[in-house]
Structure formats: C-alpha cells, structure tokens
C-alpha cells in the first residue's frame, strides 16, 4: 500500500475515532452498568431511554463541533437587596430557552470581591469560563454550591428540569453542553465590583450586554440589616458599602460612554415609577420584544413583602417601603455614609423624621449623574 493511499484511509477513519472518543469521555457520568461503560452506543441509548429530550441533546452534542457558538449573554450586574431578584426574573422570562445563572459566584460567600487578588481573579475566571460555556472539572466545588442553592435550581429551570432526571446537575460537561444549547444566557452577578466588567466588554468572542442595576443605598442597607447572611463589611458596613457603590458609579459613567450599545445603567426607583415603561426600556436595549410572561410579573398576586427572594410582589410598593420601617436616626446614619452616591443618583436627602415619613414627598428629586 503506497503512502498516499494510507493517508486517505487514516483521514477517513478520523471522524469515527473522534466520535467514539467523545461519546466515551463525555457520556460516562450517565452510565448505569458496566456493560454501558464498554459500549458507547448502549450508553447513548441509556440516556435516550431516561429522557428523550436529553437524548436529543446528547446526540446533537456528539454531532456538533466542540467550538459551538456560545449563546447571547445578558448580565445583570448589581448587589444584594437591590431589586435584582425581580429584575433578573423579568429578563429571564424574555425567551423560553434561557440559561439563567443566578448568583454564579455563590461559592465565594457574601462578600464583594473588589481587590485585584487571587480570590477575585479566581471568581472572575469562573464567571468568564461559565459565560463561554466552558465549565471544566476543576469547578466541581463551584457547581456543587450552585446545585445546592434552591433558588438557582428553581429559576434556572431550562437547566434543572433536564439535569435532575439524569442526576447530572454537577456534571461539568453536561452544564457546558446545556449552556451552549440555550438561545440566551442571563447571569445575575452580585459579588464582583463593576471594574471587572471591562474584561468582558472588551472580549471579542462574547456576544454580551451588561445592565448595571443601582438602588438607593439606604434601602439596600435597611434590607440587609434584617438578613442574617450579611456579615462582611462589604455587605453591611455603610461606609464600606457606599464607597464601593461610589466606585461602581465611576465605572458606570466610563462604560456608558465607551460601550453605549453593550452597557446600560438602570436605577431601581426609576424603573418601577412606571413598571411597564421600565420593562419596555430594558427590552429595547437588549433588542427583544416584551413577552407575555414578563407582563404577568408586572401584575402579581401579592405575597409576603418581607420574603427575601419573593418575586410575586408589587415592586413599586417596595420603592418607598424602607422609609416607614426605619427610624430617622438609622436613616441619618446611612445618609452620612452615603451622601455622595445618594446625590449622584438624584435622590432626596431627608432632613427630619417628618420628611422621611411623608410619602407625598417624592424620593426622586433630580436626574441621575449620567443625564
């Protein structure tokens, strides 16, 4: 056999070899018997029999190239108790095939990662890899943390309803493949300072838009003061919290100017002055129509307003609620620490308890700093 003929035969065999290797390496976590471990075709049939939808996904993943294009990405960048649960759910209901990464950095606990250190870099790298749908086995601890977070599994239903039948919710290959099949990837990021977003905005291989959500820091601090999870200074100390907010707002102005089509600043209080108009403005930025599922969220059946992760509540009624649940002394302490970001956001500074409790006095008194 001459050399040219040998080369042709080897080239013809490569696709078969590659497919067999891919099945063996990527479907192994789903095998249930020793026989399936030695027979890739039976292993694939096992997946199909467990769940027909998963089976179609697995067949598709075998046939497509490994560098399958990533889904479109929308990041809601904010902090705890800033209206992110409600706003994130609105965004997630735009399209049915949505991979919703709720608090993907949960493994790093309740701190704001703002220093350029190993911890912050590791958190950013995980986020970056997740957004690229490349979750490798080294992230097992991180994805296990998400698997154990009930709200992540509840809200990322596109993923959870497919992984649970196969017990694959912590399988990094399965997570990567599911991420790639989505039409859109929504990520709610609340543990990183905004300056880390520059790297994502400059990434040429990501179809990404970032929405930065800010809320009156007095409302944020008031809500966090009643939550047992908030122990670190970056979460509970007024001086630290408002210093970080001020730093974020500096980045907001720069990003809005540099990336007007990829970055948007929104303010919780202004969105829910007119929730329908606020929703339409958000969807116009991401170039998607308003869905019926989103409209249903705007007119919910009221639930416990103190429920920490409730979305079925009147968001507009929450805007001023902190004014009636905190004494003026406490609010005054927040105001002293947060005067600069409060003013930058165009919000009223209350001079007395009478003003604080007088809800006829509007909270918004001027345009925010970006106007």
Image (spheres, rainbow, N blue to C red):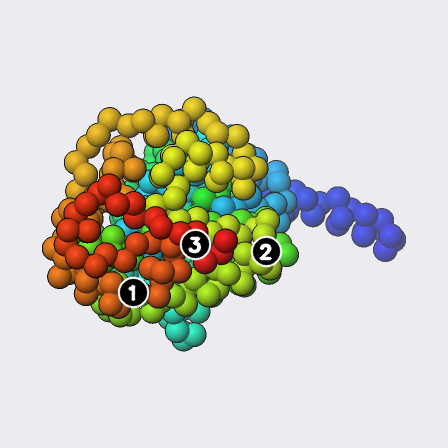
Asked if disc 2 and disc 3 are in contact, CB closer than 8 Å, the reply is no
The CA span between labels 2 and 1 is: 27 Å
Q: Which residue is identified by label 1?
A: 338
Q: Residue at x 38, y 66 (%)?
A: 246
Image position, residue 96 (x, y; %): 46, 30
Left/right placement of residue 219 relative to residue 168 reads left
The residue at which mark 2 appears reads as 259
Q: Residue at x 25, y 63 (%)?
A: 335
Q: Quadrant of residue 362?
A: top left
Q: Nearer the viewer, residue 306 or 358?
A: 358
**Image position of 147 (left or right of 291):** left
Q: Earlier in the sequence, mark 3 or mark 1?
A: 1
Q: How many marks can you see?
A: 3
Q: Secondary structure at mark 2?
A: loop
Task: Using residue 290 as the reference point, say whether residue 63 is left or right of it.
Answer: right
Contact, mark 2 vs mark 1 (Cβ under 8 Å): no
* Residue sitting farthest toward the bottom: 117
Let me know if residue 368 appears in the view.
yes
Is 34 situated above or below 236?
A: above
Question: Which label's residue is closer to the chain start, 2 or 3?
Answer: 2
The answer to whether 331 is drawn above or below residue 90 in the figure is below
- Please give the label number shown on residue 285: none
At 45% from the left edge and 58% from the top edge, which residue is drawn? Answer: 369
Would residue 181 be seen by someone viewing this image from the given angle?
no
């Amino acid at each position: 056999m001459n050399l040219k003929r040998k080369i042709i035969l080897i080239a013809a065999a490569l696709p078969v070899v590659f497919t067999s290797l891919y099945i063996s390496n990527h479907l192994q976590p789903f095998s249930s018997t020793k026989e399936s471990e030695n027979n890739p075709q039976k292993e694939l049939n096992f997946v199909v029999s467990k769940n027909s939808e998963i089976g179609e996904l697995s067949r598709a993943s075998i046939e497509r190239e490994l560098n399958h294009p990533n889904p479109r990405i929308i990041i809601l960048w904010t902090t705890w108790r800033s209206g992110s649960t409600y706003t994130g759910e609105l965004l997630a209901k735009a399209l049915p095939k949505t991979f919703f990464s709720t608090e993907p950095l949960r493994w790093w606990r309740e701190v704001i990662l703002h220093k350029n250190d190993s911890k912050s870099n590791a958190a950013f790298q995980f986020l970056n890899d997740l957004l690229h749908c490349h979750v490798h086995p080294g992230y097992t601890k991180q994805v296990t943390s998400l698997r154990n977070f009930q709200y992540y599994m509840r809200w990322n239903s596109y993923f959870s309803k497919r992984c649970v039948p196969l017990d694959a919710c912590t399988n990094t290959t399965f997570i990567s493949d599911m991420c790639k099949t989505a039409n859109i990837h929504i990520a709610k990021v609340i543990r990183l300072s905004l300056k880390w977003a520059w790297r994502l905005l400059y990434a040429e291989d990501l179809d990404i838009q970032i929405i930065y959500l800010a809320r009156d820091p007095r409302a944020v601090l008031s809500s966090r003061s009643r939550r047992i999870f908030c122990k670190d200074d970056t979460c509970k100390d007024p001086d630290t919290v408002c210093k970080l907010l001020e730093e974020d707002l500096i980045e907001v102005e720069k990003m809005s100017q540099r990336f007007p089509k990829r970055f948007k600043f929104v303010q919780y209080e202004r969105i829910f002055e007119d929730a329908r108009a606020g929703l339409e403005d958000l969807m116009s930025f991401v170039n998607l129509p308003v869905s019926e599922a989103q409209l249903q969220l705007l007119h919910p059946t009221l639930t416990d307003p103190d429920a920490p992760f409730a979305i079925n509540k009147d968001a507009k009624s929450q805007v001023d609620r902190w004014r009636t649940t905190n004494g003026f002394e406490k609010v005054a302490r927040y105001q002293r620490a947060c005067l600069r970001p409060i003013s930058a956001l165009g919000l009223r500074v209350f001079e007395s308890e009478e003003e604080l409790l007088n809800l006829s006095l509007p909270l918004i008194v001027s345009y925010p700093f970006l106007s």
